[in-house]
Image (cartoon, coloured by chain):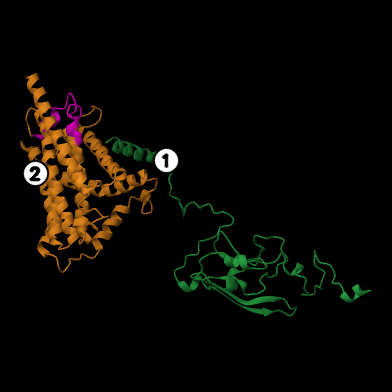
Chain colours: A orange, B green
């Protein structure tokens, strides 16, 4: 398949899924909160997403006079761009991948840490104390959780014969999904990934109870929509990444195409992340940092050591 | 750690529980018979207005949303010339129903009164008056009030005795 065709398909698909996530999240949250969820607009409330989009496009796009205009406008685009770029290396099916790169895993990690610039610049450019506190939290969260998000994947890389190539990582799970030998790494990666996409319960940068809306307090209209959609794209991204790294990517029984298995597993993880939001309260900021550095980091390092030792012992 | 997993599991089981949401416009909600909703004016079993325009409801009303004017017909029976309830002020407290000595004013389990224009929420007597006796089917104030009214002499009501001439008692 032509590369342009694949890019177009992936881009369209990811943005559609991100939009659908808005609907899916609202329906699932209502399901777990004993409510009915959106059911007014269209059959089963399906037209709720177009309605929301029309609303957010038509809203006044206000830039506060005290804001740093250029940075204020650039900030929301960053999260969209870097999360969409990360999809370039996600293998949806054996031959359905935009860039079959040798350093795909590093590219993914690099892009996910670049996403913090969106938070930092938005908080800085807003010239608002709540935004700034949110941005600071976002930075600290990203800096600390990025460390073991990357380290937790090293076990996966070792099992794939030291390859950063996503396709080889998936192929190495043909015998056994990585989630079994790398269970601690999976748990750490899941927590770190949710923290990286600053989703509830780790939405400390926006923490609406404490910081109004954190880094996007001053944003409105489509700029806020960019943050919003960026968050949903990053949910999709981390679900796809978890599936690729720990749940065998496109691998699955033969009777359905690999692409189906990949999407199926991804949607399960999207639903799981929404379930996390539905069930867990937001931790206090210092607790969150303490758990990261005092529990998750040692756990990851031990996991790397043990994995390496076992691999060496087996030869 | 364990409590986190447990709370996630409990939240998941909520997917299979009964919905708290009332499907209101599709399914009418259950309202008890004594639910305090739209206010009505009722009639006697014989079809005459119960209201005697005593103004007790207007006095009891905490928001002053009831206004009426008393008048009399040719038989001496009091009735309101106009009776007006401003439902944009009414708080449905039911004090008017409690105050009413003739069971004329009653609250009903109907709350669907939304309007686009506020003046439409002011109900006149023709909007309030219903054709039946409401919650009290047999009650007829004037039939047992003991007063002479509309052709009925004193003591002709169901539970009344003819008036006694007190001078007869002296012998």
Q: Are marks 2 and 1 in contact (CB under 8 Å)?
A: no
Along the viewing direction, whichever of A212 and A277 lies nearer the viewer: A212
Q: Residue furthest front?
A: B170
**Residue A89 showing in the rendered view:** no
Corner quadrant of residue A195: top left
Q: Residue at 28% across / 41% down in the picture?
A: A271
Q: Is residue B30 magenta?
A: no
Chain letter of the residue beneath label 2 in the structure image: A
Report the disc number at residue A110: 2
Q: Residue at 80% across / 75% down in the picture?
A: B151
Q: In the image, is A282 to the left or to the right of A65?
A: right
Corner quadrant of residue B1: top left
For label 1, the residue is: B17
Chain letter of the residue beneath label 1 in the structure image: B
Along the viewing direction, whichever of B80 and A287 lies nearer the viewer: A287
Q: Count residues near mark 2 (Cα–Cα under 10 Å), then give few for <14, some for 14-19, many for 20+.
A: some
Rendered view: A27 above or below B136: above
Quarter of the image where the C terminus of chain A is located: top left
Q: Position of residue B141 (x, y in %)?
A: 72, 68
Q: Position of residue A114 (x, y in %)?
A: 10, 48
Q: In the image, is B17 to the left or to the right of A135?
A: right
Q: Position of residue A102 (x, y in %)?
A: 5, 36
Q: In the image, is B54 to the left or to the right of B27?
A: right
Q: Position of residue A110 (x, y in %)?
A: 8, 44
* Mark 2–mark 1 distance (CA, rounded to whole Å): 43 Å
* SS category of the residue bearing label 1: loop
Q: Which residues are magenta?
A: A165-187
Q: Residue at 25% across / 38% down in the picture?
A: A269
Q: Residue furthest left?
A: A102
Q: In the image, is B108 to the left or to the right of B19?
A: right
Rendered view: A125 above or below B65: above
**Residue B82 showing in the rendered view:** yes
């Amino acid at each position: 398949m032509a590369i342009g065709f694949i890019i177009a398909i992936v881009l369209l698909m990811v943005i559609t899924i991100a939009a659908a996530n808005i609907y899916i999240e609202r329906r699932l949250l209502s399901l777990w909160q004993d409510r009915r969820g959106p059911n007014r607009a269209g059959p089963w409330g399906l037209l709720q997403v177009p309605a929301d989009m029309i609303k957010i496009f038509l809203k006044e796009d206000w830039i506060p006079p005290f804001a740093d205009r250029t940075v204020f406008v650039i900030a929301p685009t960053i999260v969209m761009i870097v999360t969409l770029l990360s999809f370039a290396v996600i293998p949806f099916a054996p031959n359905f991948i935009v860039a079959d790169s040798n350093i795909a895993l590093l590219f993914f990690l690099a892009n996910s840490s670049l996403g913090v610039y969106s938070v930092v610049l938005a908080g800085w450019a807003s010239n608002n104390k709540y935004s700034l506190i949110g941005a600071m939290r976002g930075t600290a969260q990203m800096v600390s959780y990025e460390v073991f998000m990357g380290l937790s994947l090293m076990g996966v890389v070792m099992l794939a014969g030291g390859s950063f190539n996503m396709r080889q990582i998936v192929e190495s799970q043909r015998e056994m999904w990585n989630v079994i030998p790398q269970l601690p790494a999976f748990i750490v990666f899941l927590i770190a990934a949710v923290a990286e996409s600053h989703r509830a319960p780790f939405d400390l940068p926006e923490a609406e109870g404490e910081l109004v809306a954190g880094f996007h307090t001053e944003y409105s209209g489509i700029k806020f929509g960019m943050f919003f959609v960026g968050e949903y794209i990053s949910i999709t991204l981390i679900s796809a990444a978890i599936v690729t790294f720990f749940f065998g990517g496109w691998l699955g029984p033969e009777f359905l195409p690999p692409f189906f298995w990949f999407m199926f597993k991804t949607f399960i993880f999207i639903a799981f992340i929404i379930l996390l939001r539905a069930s867990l309260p937001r931790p206090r900021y210092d607790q969150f940092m303490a758990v990261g550095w005092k529990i998750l980091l040692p756990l990851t390092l031990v996991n790397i050591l043990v994995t390496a030792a076992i691999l060496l012992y087996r030869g | 750690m364990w409590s986190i997993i447990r709370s996630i599991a409990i939240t998941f089981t909520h997917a299979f529980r009964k919905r708290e949401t009332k499907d209101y416009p599709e399914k009418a909600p259950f309202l008890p018979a004594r639910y305090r909703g739209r206010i009505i004016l009722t009639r006697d079993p014989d079809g005459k207005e119960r209201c005697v325009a005593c103004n007790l409801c207007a006095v009891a009303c905490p928001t002053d949303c009831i206004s009426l004017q008393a008048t009399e017909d040719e038989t001496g029976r009091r009735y309101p010339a106009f009776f007006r309830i401003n439902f944009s002020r009414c708080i449905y407290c039911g004090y008017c129903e409690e105050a009413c000595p003739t069971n004329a004013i009653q609250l009903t389990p109907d709350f669907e009164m939304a309007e686009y224009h506020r003046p439409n929420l002011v109900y006149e007597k023709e909007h309030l008056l219903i054709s039946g006796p409401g919650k009290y089917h047999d009650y007829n104030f004037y039939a047992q009030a003991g007063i002479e009214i509309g052709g009925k002499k004193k003591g002709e009501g169901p539970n009344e005795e003819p008036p006694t001439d007190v001078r007869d008692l002296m012998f």
